[in-house]
């Protein structure tokens, strides 16, 4: 499936909407699910998302003293893992949704983490940071929710220092046909039902399932990254392509 490059419209799940409208709708979705977001991730993936995030941090291999930007990670799940791996890293979490950031701040306090993480409200398409500021940029299960994927990738390249690393963890195209059919059935039947039972919000999880199907496949996303300026672009499938890790460098 190819990405959407129209200048005025994009996909919100299976609906065509204006880009600005998608941004507002996505903020509404994550405002609705913020307090149960991490619990739902565990339930929906049967905990496998933890292994995927560990794989991302292993591939990133963060080093002492690095400045790392985590985009769309408002609840802090990836930031906390980075800080555990490299306690003196300088981590900035940037998220569109204040309710998600509030969850992350509260979780940090509960863990006794009072320094090392900066929490910033911002849009991946218009990052509120100077160019060439960060050593690494991570984005986990967020890029598909951005209204303009190309712009977000260009922004990622802009804020990275020369030699900086971009890593994207996102749902992708299942490589095994038999598994793909079972995954579709699970996604469209079970996940919205779980959203209704746990969060009281079926529609938000219906959107999240549809957004996965609208997102570019592995090769298409790799091509978009190269077009945005990234070098040495590569990807790794996780769980037979249910998710994929994409890597690129600003050189």
Image (spheres, grey):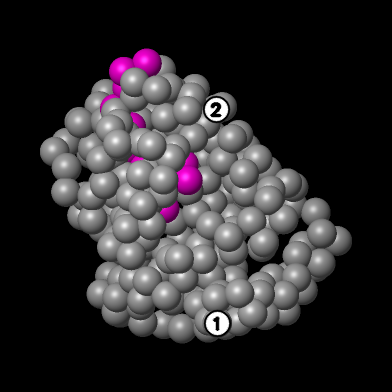
Secondary structure at badge 2 equals helix
Looking at the image, which is closer to me, 93 or 99? 99
- Mark 1 touches mark 2? (CB < 8 Å): no
Q: Quadrant of the C terminus?
A: top left
Percent across and percent down for residue 2 are 51, 62
Q: Is residue 179 left or right of residue 75?
A: right
> Of all residues shown, which one is farthest toward the left?
130
Query: Does 75 lie within the magenta span?
Result: yes
Q: Is residue 135 left or right of residue 215?
A: left
Q: Of discs 1 and 2, which sits in the foreground?
A: 1
Q: Is residue 210 above or below residue 135?
A: below
Residue 150 position by quadrant: bottom left
Q: CA distance from mark 1 to mark 2?
A: 36 Å
Q: Residue at x 30, y 36 (%)?
A: 114
Q: Is residue 76 above or below residue 229?
A: below
Percent across and percent down for residue 10 are 38, 73
Q: Residue at x 55, y 82 (%)?
A: 200
**What is the number of the mark on residue 200?**
1
Say few, some or many: other residues with alpha carbon within 10 Å of mark 2 (under 14 / 14 to 19 / 20 or more): few
Q: Residue at x 59, y 35 (%)?
A: 54
**What is the number of the mark on residue 139?**
none
Does the rendering let one see residue 70? yes
Highlighted range, magenta: 64-78
Q: Is residue 226 left or right of residue 13?
A: left
Q: Quadrant of the N terminus?
A: bottom right
Residue 185 position by quadrant: bottom right
Looking at the image, which is closer to me, 70 or 222? 70
Q: Which residue is mark 2?
A: 59
Looking at the image, which is closer to me, 26 or 152? 26
Does the rendering let one see residue 174? no
Q: Earlier in the sequence, mark 1 or mark 2?
A: 2
Percent across and percent down for residue 121 are 23, 55
């Amino acid at each position: 499936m190819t990405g959407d490059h129209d200048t005025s419209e994009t996909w919100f799940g299976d609906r065509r909407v204006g880009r600005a409208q998608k941004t507002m709708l996505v903020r509404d979705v994550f405002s609705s699910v913020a307090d149960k977001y991490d619990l739902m991730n565990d339930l929906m993936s049967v905990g496998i998302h933890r292994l995927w995030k560990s794989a991302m941090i292993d591939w990133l291999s963060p080093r002492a003293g690095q400045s790392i930007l985590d985009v769309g990670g408002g609840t802090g799940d990836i930031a906390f893992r980075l800080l555990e791996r490299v306690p003196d890293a300088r981590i900035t979490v940037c998220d569109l949704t204040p309710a998600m950031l509030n969850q992350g701040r509260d979780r940090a306090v509960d863990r006794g983490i009072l320094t090392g993480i900066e929490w910033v409200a911002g849009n991946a398409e218009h990052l509120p940071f100077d160019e060439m500021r960060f050593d690494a940029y991570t984005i986990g299960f967020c890029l598909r929710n951005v209204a303009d994927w190309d712009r977000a990738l260009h922004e990622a390249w802009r804020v990275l220092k020369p030699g900086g690393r971009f890593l994207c963890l996102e749902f992708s195209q299942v490589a095994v046909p038999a598994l793909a059919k079972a995954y579709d059935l699970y996604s469209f039947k079970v996940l919205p039902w779980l959203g209704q039972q746990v969060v009281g919000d079926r529609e938000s999880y219906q959107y999240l399932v549809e957004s996965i199907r609208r997102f570019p496949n592995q090769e298409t996303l790799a091509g978009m990254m190269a077009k945005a300026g990234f070098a040495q672009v590569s990807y790794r499938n996780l769980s037979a392509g249910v998710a994929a890790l994409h890597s690129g460098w600003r050189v």
